[in-house]
Amino acid sequence: MRIHRPLADAVVGTLQEIFLNKRHADRAIEYVLKSNRKWGSRDRAFIAENTYEIVRWWRLLHFVIDAPAQLNKFHFWQAFGAWQLLKQRHVQSPEFLQNLPDWPEFSKMSVAAVHARYEEAGKVRKIIASVPDWLDALGVAELGEEKWTTELDALNQQAPVVLRTNTLKTNREHLQDLLSDNDIIASFNNELPDGLILEGRPNVFRTPYFQEGFFEVQDAASQLVAPYLDVKAGMRVIDACAGAGGKTLHIAALMQNKGRIIAMDVEERKLQELQKRARRAGAMNLETRLIEAKTIKRLQASADRLLLDVPCSGLGVLRRNPDAKWKLTPEFIENLHTVQYNILTQYATMLKKGGKMVFATCSLLPSESEAHVQRFLREQGEHWQLLAERRTSPAEDGYDGFYMACLQRL
């Protein structure tokens, strides 16, 4: 394997943006890929995959190169070099280096020292699995040693690319054929009536079928949430934490564009993105509303169905967002608990009697999920019935780590 210097420069520069300038990994990568239109698909894949993997294994690489707390550009180059040496051992990558290029940044690096430090790292889970001390301790406290270890291993694997067919415009069999014509191989998942699992990591956003709104990229676990609402055409549905609207658009498709969906969020920019996506998808039965002081009160007892996909740590989707490990703090998660429960108790008033509500998170932690539902039922159980709940597991079923509970208002 030979590394081209401009690609290495791009990776190192992107890493500095992520760790020193605190940019989100996906946005930093998107920015650098747009900066040079001459890069081909292999070059772009090298930059994206190496950046994500170095971010994922940052603590391990930090340990292997024996970096100080205060980092400079030199240390990012060392981390890049160490990853090229360790790829085969750590993730069985076919593309790795036996020796580093004769570049000034690597002049003081020892290949033998890198491998020796890697052996030492293997004795400590939080280092070899590359997580902060506090997160490792929290995972053990909430899930137990064995389950946390297996989930952590799964969270460090690269996630598959999963599509949700937009049934307002096509069906998955037809979409599978269209993608095949573009040399994109997709298979079915029997649990997902509209899902397609892609082989490899093709850039589906560059296909005409994305522009035509034939699909959305949406993990399998996320695709289970909207059906949990048991929506019917003609209903009035509120998606109260809609964000950019992946689940909102799924609800619209399940309702066959009949009825009314109110998609709400506290951030206007996310609702604007949802409006753009809705136009592309042909979802005509939804409106967006910014959540303000009186929004919830005005909608009391108005919804047949209510989705509360509440803000959470995102620990169930670390496969896709590995930089979250380094941005989260225990204080942030503790504060989230209050936010999550307040949303559950305050927003639940928007549901009619007899209606169904789904409370969902993309977290592995019971403190963000099951614990809130149990407390809610203890405090308001005479007015609510738990109909079903489900947790998905990266380790057990290969899906992102989601929790969802369906409750009925009595």
Image (cartoon, grey):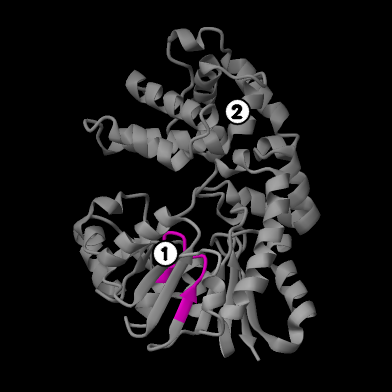
User: Could you tell me which residue is drawn at 56 percent across and 8 percent down?
Assistant: 108
Q: Is residue 189 visible?
A: no
User: Could you tell me which residue is drawn at 77 percent across and 57 percent down?
Assistant: 142
Depth check: 312 or 45 in front?
312
Three-letter amino acid code at the position of disc 2: Leu
Q: Residues within 10 Å of mark 2 (few under 14, many from 20)?
A: many
Q: Which quadrant of the rendered structure holds the N terminus? A: top left
Q: Is residue 218 left or right of residue 19?
A: left
Q: Position of residue 377 (x, y in %)?
A: 75, 79
Q: Is residue 44 left or right of residue 358?
A: left
Determine which residue is flagged by label 1.
246
User: Could you tell me which residue is drawn at 35 percent across and 32 percent down?
Assistant: 32
Do callouts 1 and 2 mark residues in contact (Cβ within 8 Å)?
no
How many numbered marks does the figure carry? 2
User: Could you tell me which residue is drawn at 24 percent across and 74 percent down?
Assistant: 169
Instruction: Determine the CA span between mark 1 and mark 2.
Output: 34 Å
Determine which residue is flagged by label 2.
61
The magenta region covers 237-248
Three-letter amino acid code at the position of disc 1: Gly
> Does 247 lie within the magenta span?
yes
Taking the view exactly as shown, the residue that stands out farthest to the front is 294
> Does 281 lie within the magenta span?
no
Indicate which label's residue lies in the foreground, 1 or 2. 1
| SS assignment at label 2 | helix
Q: Is residue 103 above or below residue 262?
A: above
Q: Position of residue 52 (x, y in %)?
A: 48, 38
Q: Is residue 271 left or right of residue 38?
A: right
Q: Which badge, 1 or 2, comes first in the chain's sequence?
A: 2
Q: Position of residue 371 (x, y in %)?
A: 75, 68
| SS assignment at label 1 | helix
